[in-house]
Image (cartoon, helix red, strand yellow):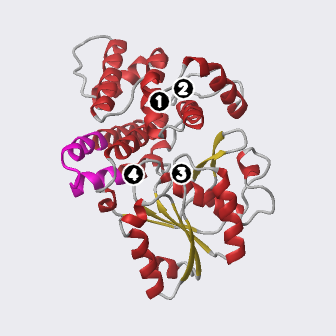
Amino acid sequence: SSDLLLKQYKATRVFIHYGGGSVIRSGLLGRIKGLLDQADISYFELGGVLPNPRSGLVYKGIELCRREGADFVLAVGGGSTIDSAKAIAAGVKYEGDFWDFYIGKATIQDALPIGVVLTIAATGSEASQGAVITQERGMFKRGLSSRYYRPRFSIINPELAYTLPRYHLFAGIADIMSHIFERYLTLTKDVILTDRMSEAVLKSVMEAARIIKDDPTNYEAMATIFWSGTIAHNGLLGVGRQEDWSSHALEHELSALYDVSHGAGLAVIFPAFMEYTIDVDPLRYKRLAVKVFDVPDDGSDARTLGLRGIDNLKSFYRELGLPVTFAELGAKCDDIDKLVEKLRQNRGEVIGSFKRLT
């Protein structure tokens, strides 16, 4: 449990970071505090993390941790809470503005140790080196990878997700799948083992999603979703292969401007990206269609089979109640120039590797 793990890491003054009211209403936060009281570990807290976590709360958390003398950060929640906690953990140890890390002005040299109690499977932040924050001065959403961001431990209990709104859970599944697509769509040849591992996780999470849709408290299916989220973004499925990440860069601009769920934005972006890039490697898309999206290999050419697979992916997202068009997200044609300009400021003139996008 969290108290024993915190003792193992010699935590004496714990900063508990969380989001909205769900961890309070469910009693989870109270249970954690009770365990820490029993273990005689002191703590203080800061809630209020929003989806697409903001810089303002990070600055507040850094100031609070310095004042209170934190020696460990415990994130209780999903990806947004974990990412906010990571930024705070690094910012406490840095004399300048934590945003310096996100604009390449400084490199993280140290951070407070981080632990996680995960409540939703989505970002994989519970096991990854990444954290994404939105800077409220200009609403720039940026990601950062650092070995100091890898949590010391993560408690992953699928039962904590039983009461989640279905939309959030299913948007999380689109996020999980997108982390695999970013690695699967590669120009690297002869990476068959990670291809097959990626296909297995994609198939498993899709099967589990359909079970959860009808049976929200099915433990095995929820456990599959949670474990898939961790495997999808802990680095395992990217071993030995070039990764892309242009779809994430595109989506970050959508969620920065419209404050949409990251997973919902990715459900719109990825099928469009796939259609746009299918001619880069039709055989790769054929493989994805046949191995993952249940497209029969009827002898049609690779491009045709690949497009059928993309259609099946869209149908799957629709089945889960997720958007698949910009209109369904509430995006506006008039904002395209603004989105592109923000992308240029954030990422430069060219992004991606599978197909270089200007």
Q: Is residue 1 above or below residue 191?
A: below
CB atoms of marks 3 and 2 within 8 Å: no
Residue 147, placed above or below residue 169: below
Q: CA distance from mark 3 to mark 1?
A: 31 Å
Q: Which element carries disc 1, helix, strand or loop?
A: loop
Instruction: Identify the amino acid type marked 1.
Output: Leu
Q: Which of the marked residues, 2 or 4, is nearer the chain's N terminus?
A: 4
Of the image marks 3 and 4, the number of the one nearer the N terminus: 3
Query: How many numbered marks does the figure carry?
Result: 4
Q: Quadrant of the C terminus?
A: top right
**What range of the chain is rendered magenta?**
205-227
- Magenta span contains residue 326: no
Q: Residues within 10 Å of mark 3 (few under 14, many from 20)?
A: some
Q: Secondary structure at mark 2?
A: loop
**Disc 2 from disc 1: Cα separation:** 6 Å
Magenta span: helix, strand or loop, mainly?
A: helix
For disc 4, the marked residue is 121
